[in-house]
Amino acid sequence: MSDLGDFEGYERPVEADEPPDREAAEEGFEPMDLDPVGTDRGIGVLSASEGLRISEEADDTRLRAYVAVGNRAAVRIGSYLLVPYPDGESLFSRIAALEYVQEFHTDDATEIHARRAMRSAGIDEQDYKFMASLEPVAILYDDEGELHRRMTDRVPKPETIIRPAADADEIKTGLKIPGDGVFLGHLSVGGEKVRTAAEPPTIDYRLKDTYDKGDPLVFRHSLIAGGTGSGKTHAAKNVLRQYLSPDRTYPVETGSSRTVRPAVVQFDPQDEYAQMHDDNPVVTAEDRRRWEREGIAHGGHDDTIAFIPRVGDSSYAANHHRAEQVEFTIPFSMVQGNPWLVAGAQLNDNQYSALTYLIKRFFRDQGDSGTYQAFKSFLDEPGLREQLDETGRVHEATFDAVKRRVLGGPFGQVFDGDARPITDLVHDFVRPGGLTVVPTYHISSTRAAETVVLAVASLLVDEKLSNDPDYDRIKDTPLIIGMDEAHNFLTDAESVQARHVIGKFTDAAKQGRKERLGLFLITQDPQDIADAVFKQINTTVVLNLGDEDAISAVNIPSNLEQKVPYMETGQMVVYSPDNSEPVELIGLPKCVTRHGRD
């Protein structure tokens, strides 16, 4: 055993005439002159020491690069690199892994090496190779002066100099990000914005919004998922504000030359979105100039109206926004086409069939003016129960069950309140270029609030999907239905009501492209949204989520999934296969409209 004494005082003896590269000298090699003839370019070179391979199978691909000592501190997992081919094409790639590898075959896990390192100012990085494993993304090539991309189908040469991707056009083409569209945020890696030498130095990420190559992604539906404090409402407001820009229009129907601005209807359980009427007081003149240079819509949206549901004795009082307020009620006549609105969550299929028959018979006798109170009286009619049982229409026990559910729910507060029916307000409710907010925070009953939201949302969806609509205003206006806390309304469940709700919104999602209808869902519990609806979502924006089930449910690539629990407020992952490669973004640090109660 070597007599090294304790850690203090031990130093490796060095001979005065010892060459700088001791091991090389001992082997009889002369020290190499590493001074370059010219100037170093790039960050390193491709290494073929373990082979270079491009394969159709990702696991069989092997691309490794040696990173020069001076560049190592700046290299990050996820950084984008370009590897040129001799004929002018380039391999666009990202760093998937980083590691140190020993330069010489020596054991550095020894007492002597450990003590030497503990006393030194730092290791000599030239004793180690710093290797980056690259994930090929696409091949970039020039076609008549325009940059294009294709799948990776060729292997680059060994010792090819690698440089960071620093041109916005190269990066956007490599990642398949559209040049124009709806702004979501700025491209980032590891929480830091990707910078270029251009002005602005950041790279904007946009969602495709024209019919040139497919459908606008707004009509293929979006989901924003994030935990409390992740910034999902801030992000949602910024995105919705872009759709309300005056120059955002869509054809009324395929091939039509007439275009119409979209209407946005936002269901708001926390009473936050009516603030979009107002400017954000913390936004500076410099913020506005920067956003204008980048083509980002900003500022309060004047055409914002808060439609307030009149439910029982509830009252709405808001001093945190200046949007116009209009009260409305849900007329019981809307139940004709949607009996499940009064089914609740407890009726079985047999009972629901009975309810449907009773509602049809009631409106056949009463006409469209039938009210909820009149329906209660109808159920109380002497002899109705026995008559239905004797004719075999509805069994007595089934009738009793239906009556208990219908009379025992919150429906007396929901229907036919002291306000104008929503069916009389459609022209004002759906306005091209207008934002309609339906707050439900003031409604104390959760079931009552859910009934209001589902009734209004169903009116919009039914009219959009109808071949013979009652309200051309809805049918002819491109429509975005925003639903915060969407997991409360679109959850998978066994009840009759849930099945009808999910079926309706699944149909809406499937036909959205044709009917100019987009769903914009916001949730902190994406795992609770029905799978049939979730499968129709094309664009998923994920902010910080701490719950493993929630992270797994959003179904993003594993390399990005691992980052989600560690993302700071405003950081996000965007997974939109028809728009771009999966990427990290940073949203705007300030909301483009008013946000918060201060």
Image (spheres, rainbow, N blue to C red):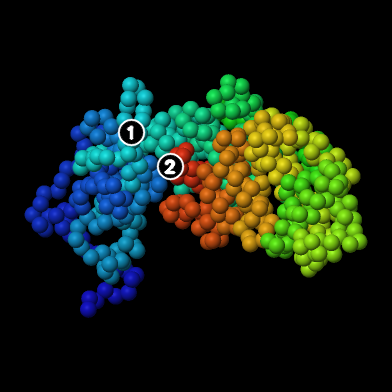
Residue drawn at 90 percent across, 56 percent down: 377
Picture coordinates of residue 541 (x, y %)?
54, 46
Picture coordinates of residue 238 (x, y %)?
62, 38
Query: Is residue 156 or residue 486 the one in the foreground?
Result: 486
Give the secondary structure at mark 1.
strand
Picture coordinates of residue 66 (x, y %)?
26, 47
Give the secondary structure at mark 2.
loop
Q: Is residue 384 left or right of residue 174?
A: right
Amino acid identity at mark 1 = Leu
Residue drawn at 33 percent across, 35 percent down: 150
Amino acid identity at mark 2 = Glu
Most extreme residue toward the bottom, as rendered?
1
Residue 4's image quarter? bottom left
Residue 348's image quarter? bottom right
Bin the neighbour count of mark 2 within 10 Å (Cα to Cα): few under 14, some 14-19, many 20 and up. Answer: some
Tell how many labels: 2
Residue drawn at 35 percent across, 56 percent down: 121
Which mark, by number, is residue 581?
2
- Quarter of the image for the C terminus: give it: top right
Picture coordinates of residue 486 (x, y %)?
65, 51
Residue drawn at 36 percent across, 44 percent down: 94
Which mark, by number, is residue 140?
1
Query: Is residue 94 or residue 215 the one in the foreground?
Result: 215
N-term-proximal mark, 2 vs 1? 1
Q: Is residue 49 left or right of residue 280?
A: left
Q: Is residue 372 above or below residue 90?
A: below
